[in-house]
Image: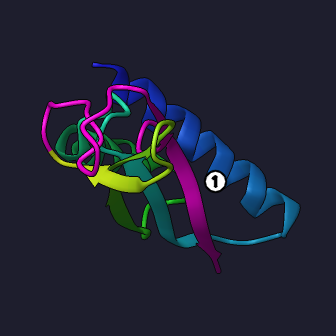
Amino acid sequence: MHEYSIVNSLIELCEAEAGKHQATGVSRVEVKIGAYSGVEPHLLEVAFDTFKEESICKNADFIMHIQPLKVRCLSCGDENELDTGRYLCPQCESTDIEVIDGEEMYLMRLELE
């Protein structure tokens, strides 16, 4: 489960940021997870709840925003969210599309105490 290593890195990042700002704790960790990032949100949440206990994040709320896959059609220029396994432009049905969002995971917000 790579969610454990992701959470480990996330908590290390939180601790580093808290240290930079002389914070005594983290009250909120907010992340954006792309639907096609390869990260399983439920497992990430379980891992965060497990590993936060021994860290500066022990009292933090963990908020996840799931980002659908967004694509731009290189044929017609239309931008859409795809919610099926079909990699076609919903407008013109071209397969000449590029992913513009939904494959990454980002730390969006960190609230420090």
Q: Which residue is at a point 46% across and 57% down the rendered structure image?
A: 31
Residue 44, compared with residue 39, is above or below; it is below
- Which residue is more in the foreground, 20 or 88? 88
Residue 86 lies in the magenta stretch: yes
Residue 83 coordinates in the image, percent (x, y) = 17, 47
Residue range of the region highlighted in magenta in the rendering = 84-113
Q: In the rendered image, which quarter contains the C terminus?
A: bottom right
Q: Which residue is at a point 27% across and 19% down the rendered structure image?
A: 1
Residue 111, compared with residue 90, is above or below; it is below
Residue 37 coordinates in the image, percent (x, y) = 38, 33
Q: According to the image, label 1 marks what residue?
A: 14
**Residue type of the residue flagged with mark 1:** Cys
Quick check: 1 left or right of 12? left
Q: Which residue is at a point 57% across and 62% down the rendered structure image?
A: 108
Quick check: 66 left or right of 16? left
- Which residue is more in the foreground, 80 or 67? 80
Residue that extends furthest to the bottom in the rendered view of this protein: 113
